[in-house]
Amino acid sequence: MLKQQLLSVEPKPFVKWAGGKRQLIQIIERHIPADFGTYFEPFLGGGAVLFHLLSKNPSMKCSVSDLNSDLVLAYSVIRDRVKELISSLENHSKYYLKNPDSYYYSVRDAEPTNSIDKVSRLLFLNRTCFNGLYRVNSKGKFNVPLGRYSNPNIVNEENLLSVSHILQSKRIQITCQDFSSVLVQAKKNDFVYFDPPYQPTSRTANFTSYTDKNFTYEDLEMLVDVSEKLDRKGCKVLHSNSKSKDVTEMFSSKWKVIEIPVNRAINSDPAKRTGHTELLIKNY
């Protein structure tokens, strides 16, 4: 009975992540190759594209990764120990509702050592912090203030069970590693989707603090180099990135560049969240 229920609920990202692709899924889907071998996503983040593809084809072979070790741990715990995680989140929800302000900051300052408490803290902060924004400082500490929510969905049990169910597949590998490692693993006809921290389009637009290491111009150069090598191996490669001069100048003319409209959900000024464009760049 439980299995049928899980299959009827399409898994969605369990964290709100800056640059998350849920709102763009229908556009991105039109640019996904009709057939491919293994799916690689080296900047996994909230996993919107992964979950969408898996909901269409649960037996798809995937190798996904992220450099944020806390996030990778979350995927592993949801896959392997989801009931314990849900129980921990229920406790967070209970104490938060009694005194949101003091409880939020006590959890933000905490440094749990076991896996369940680490992931539970991450999800709790993500659901209750300002704008649902994951950000760490130079010391790797989460530093976002409390958000203004009357009744945040801290547990979200149905989605966690659905995500856990779809990640059970033995054909899905989740690792914590640098994006360049995809070069060793990917073969001809595999599909690689890169969704890195975006290059800033202006001096004030810089947001790359998903980990305590920023994604630099040199990292972008390396990413383009990795993409060119994947192209020569016969891989199908798709990028999402900002419509910035750095990005457009780095890719050679053989790459197809598609401009798409997008909203910026994390801007603190709601008036500045609309009217933006970004790029999809592909070699097929």
Image: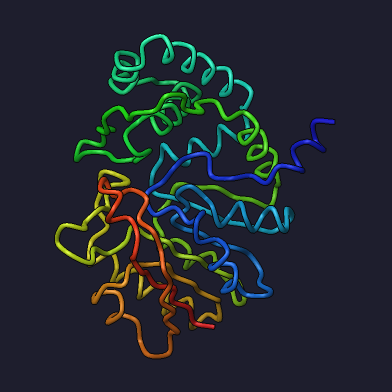
* Residue 19 spot, x, y in % from top left: 39, 54
* Residue 7 spot, x, y in % from top left: 76, 43
The image quarter containing residue 99 is: top left
Q: Quadrant of the C terminus?
A: bottom right
* Residue 227 spot, x, y in % from top left: 42, 74
Q: Residue at 54%, 67% (x, y): give it.
A: 28
* Residue 32 spot, x, y in % from top left: 59, 71
Query: Can you say whether 209 is above or below 124 in the image?
Result: below
Q: Nearer the viewer, residue 232 or 127?
A: 127
Q: Residue at 43%, 76% (x, y): give it.
A: 281
Q: Residue at 23%, 63% (x, y): give it.
A: 200
The image quarter containing residue 62 is: bottom right
The image quarter containing residue 90 is: top right
Looking at this view, name the residue that lies furthest to the bottom.
253
Q: Is residue 54 left or right of residue 156?
A: right
Q: Nearer the viewer, residue 152 or 190?
A: 152
Q: Nearer the viewer, residue 273 or 189?
A: 273
Q: Is residue 142 left or right of residue 171?
A: left
